[in-house]
Structure formats: C-alpha cells, structure tokens
Image (spheres, helix red, strand yellow):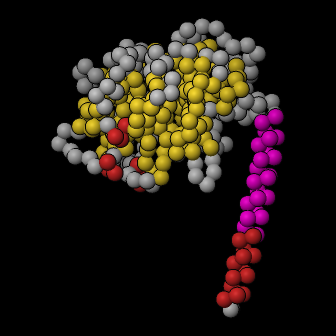
Amino acid sequence: MTTRTRSIVLLVVILLALGGAGGYGVWAYARYQEQSRAPSEVPVASAAPAGPVIFFRNTASGQGQGMVATVPASSPHGSRTLTAQACDRIDVAAGRRICLHAQIGLVNSTDEEILDADWHLLRTRTLAGAPSRARLSFDGTLAASTVFVTGHAYSSSFSTATEISATDGSSLGNLENFAIDVPGTTLAPQERNVWGVTFAKDGDTFYATVGSSDRNWLVRGSIKQRTLTAIHSGVECPSLSPDGTRIAFKIKSPDPNQPLVRLLAVLDLTTDRVTRLAEARNVDDQAEWLDDSTILYGLARGAPIGDSDVWSLPADGTGVPSLFIEHAWSPAVVIQ
C-alpha cells in the first residue's frame, strides 16, 4: 500500500468515525429531548414547601431531571417541588445558593453560579475542570468550590483545584497556595491536593482535606492567615456538624482487598475520637448534616447512569442506613 493510498484510507476512516459520532450525537440529543419532555417518574408538587426544607439535585427521569428540587425536611418522601435551575452540585445558606454546572467539551469546565433566594444570578465564573464539591458558609458570605482537573496525584490521573471566594465576587485564592503545615512531612506544591471545604461559623475558620499520593489529612484552615494546619490523618471530605463539635468524613476501608472503598465516620474534635458509622457501602460524597444527630449522603444507583438516592444515618454509629430521598443528589438542609 502506497503512502498516498494509506492517507486516503486514513481520511475515509476519520470521516466515517466523525460521521458516526455526529449521528450518535444527534440521536442522543433527540433521546434526551424526548426524555426531558416525559412526565417525571416521581410525584411533583405545584408549590414550594414552607418551613425547613431540603434542597437537592433531582435525578429522576422525565421533566425536571438535573434541576434543583425541594422537599419538606419533615416529609422527604413526599412530592418534590422543581425549580428551573440546573445544577450538578448545590448548597444553600442564608438566602444564597451556589450551583456548580458542568460544561462538557474537548476541555471540561464548570460554571460556578451564585444566586439569591429567588434564583436571580448574582455572579458567575468558569472554573477549569469537572464539578466535585460546593459549600457555602453559614452566613452565605463565603463560597468554596472544588473541581477535578487533569494533573497529578489524585486517583493517579486527576487532581483537584479548590478555591474560596466571597459570594459578592472577590476570590480568596486557590487553597494549594495557602501555607500547609503537616507535622513531620514536607509537601511540594505538585505533591498535594486540597478538597472538600466545610466552614465554621466564625467567618475565618474552615476545614478541608489535604491529600498527597495515598495519604490524606484533615486540616484546619484560616482565611485571614492563609494557612492549613493538619489536625488528624486519614480524613476525606469533612463536613462540620451544626454545633461545631464533630466532623463527618470518609475513611478508607480497612479491607486491603478494597483499596478504593470509602466508608463513613465521625471525628469528635474535642476528644479526637473516631466513630465508624453503620454504612458498609462505598460512599463517593461529602456528607451533609440533617441535624446534630443525623447525616445525609448520596449513593449512586448504578443504573441508569447518573441516577442516585440520598440516604440518612445516625451520627453516633448506631442504627442502619435509611432511604431519605429517592432519585436525589447533593442535599442541602435549610432551616428557615
């Protein structure tokens, strides 16, 4: 086969591949449009609930899939109210909402949107990477976003980028640029990832995970001093309890045959005592506290891809997991 013939054959293969991809893209889009117009597979309410509510990403097929929804905290199994806001990650506090929305392309990016209580857009910016975690401070003045980006360390092929910003617009910087103090360990910038922010109520303190290779630490951060100080090892995706005394987090499975499995635990910040919780399944989420005794977290259903449920679990190690909201993801508790 001559060079010219090989070139022609290669060109034909490329054109066929592009044509097939284009045809599949048209089919997939048409299929999505059809599904999005179908009635929702879950009951939908016509009016927003009053009192304490749970915001979440609706993963039920049909109308409203991918949109933010709410249910009463007292009746999470009941009908949900759908909004017109699409989010992959949502958090809500003090009349503010943070929404991370994936933009899929040759290079993945994330739209980070800050909205008010009526879903009016206050500001937006584009982050390089796929959405991972989002949190607001208790008073709604600070926002933290984590995205996955291609690079070093995290899961061998990904790294994280985590920023804290004021919800009025000013960025406080990437946390990898904060001074990191892990006693007995020196971490070069290319060796560390920071993710999973959770805010304390004082307006300065926050907690996060610092990871390097297969090691990770819970760090206490200071926005004013721009520091991260390790206070406990083996903690991933911390979530501070409403009373500020405990951290719910993910811990590596003790089973050496399950190196990628993450289980739930709670750390008492006063005694440094860790309590394993009664959830044996792999959890790929940052927990949310329903109240001082119960945590919420998402678990993927497996099929169809993208569907998930929110589960609840006592935070003291007792009880068993309970299905809290079907076809839901990224819960945010709002006590009005």
Give percent across and percent down for residue 159: 43, 48
* Residue 253 shown left or right of residue 166 in the figure: left
**Residue 62 in picture, x, y percent from top left:** 76, 33
**268, 176: nearer the viewer:** 176
Magenta stretch: dominant secondary structure: helix
- Quarter of the image for the N terminus: give it: bottom right
Q: Is residue 87 left or right of residue 157?
A: right
**Relative height, residue 124 to residue 32 (above, below):** above
Residue 22 inside the magenta-drawn segment: yes
Residue placed farthest to the bottom in the image?
2
Tell me, yes or no, whether the highlighted magenta stretch contains residue 315.
Answer: no
Residue 20 spot, x, y in % from top left: 76, 63
Question: As displayed, is residue 13 above or below residue 325?
Answer: below
Asked whether, in this view, residue 191 is left or right of residue 56, the answer is: left
Q: Position of residue 79 (x, y in %)?
A: 70, 18
Q: Which residues are magenta?
A: 16-37
Q: Residue at x 41, y 26 (%)?
A: 198
